[in-house]
């Protein structure tokens, strides 16, 4: 993987190890986003693409937490491999009381829409699996988060104007 136009997400709760990774990768010319937990950088950014190199017969899991959101979010997930849509991923919605909101869903190659983060469910787990028995695989995970607008006051429209006073 060449550094041109590549962004790398470093997720590590150990600050010293995270800084070392950022320094080494920055020296190689990569654009780095470093965070201590899950998808906290994506939450602020709205839409991001991340390259994931996954070893043979291995899965990587990520958690997007929405339990402290004031307004719910809609989440769109798209997983690609070599530019083509992939279904080698799963999503799992967990309620704020840590019970399942719904059964695990396999990601679709065209993209998966999951509305209601922060309202319908509190956490979103994303798992990406490399089924190849001998070679690592590079996937690209695109996460798009949009804020749901709060419900406003709905007024009925009448072509005759306002009703009687």
Image (cartoon, rainbow, N blue to C red):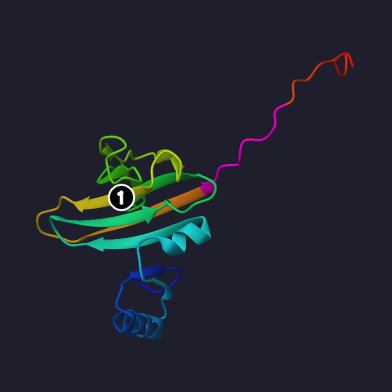
Question: Does residue 46 appear left or right of residue 60 in this picture?
Answer: right
In percent of width and height, residue 127 lies at 26, 51
* Residue 153 magenta-highlighted: yes
* 9 in relation to 61, above or below: below
- Say which residue appears at 14% left-offset and 53% top-offset: 132
Residue closest to the eye, 65 or 48: 65
Residue closest to the eye, 124 or 109: 124
Q: Main secondary structure of the magenta part?
A: loop
What range is drawn magenta here?
A: 146-154
In percent of width and height, residue 72 lies at 51, 44
- Say which residue appears at 86% left-offset and 19% top-offset: 162
Q: Which residue is mark 1?
A: 125
At label 1, counting other C-alpha atoms closer than 10 Å, the crowd grade (few under 14, some 14-19, many 20 or more) is some
- Say which residue appears at 28% left-offset and 46% top-offset: 98
* Image quarter in which the C terminus is found: top right
For the view shown, which residue lies furthest in the front direction?
Answer: 165
In percent of width and height, residue 3 lies at 40, 74
SS for callout 1: strand
Question: Does residue 148 appear left or right of residue 96 in this picture?
Answer: right
- Choose top left, top right, bottom left or bottom right for residue 42: bottom left
* Residue 63 magenta-highlighted: no
């Amino acid at each position: 993987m060449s550094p041109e136009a590549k962004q790398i997400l470093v997720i590590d709760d150990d600050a010293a190890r995270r800084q070392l990774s950022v320094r080494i990768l920055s020296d190689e010319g990569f654009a780095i986003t470093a965070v201590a937990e899950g998808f906290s950088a994506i939450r602020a950014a709205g839409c991001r693409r991340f390259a994931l190199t996954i070893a043979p017969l291995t899965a990587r899991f990520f958690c997007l937490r929405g339990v402290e959101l004031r307004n719910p979010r809609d989440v769109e997930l798209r997983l690609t491999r070599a530019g083509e849509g992939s279904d080698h991923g799963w999503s799992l919605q967990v309620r704020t009381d840590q019970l399942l909101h719904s059964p695990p869903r396999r990601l679709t190659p065209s993209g998966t829409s999951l509305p209601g983060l922060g309202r319908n469910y509190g956490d979103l787990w994303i798992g990406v699996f490399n089924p190849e028995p001998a070679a690592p695989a590079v996937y690209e995970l695109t996460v798009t988060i949009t804020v749901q607008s709060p419900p406003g006051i709905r007024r009925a429209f009448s072509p005759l104007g306002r009703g009687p006073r």
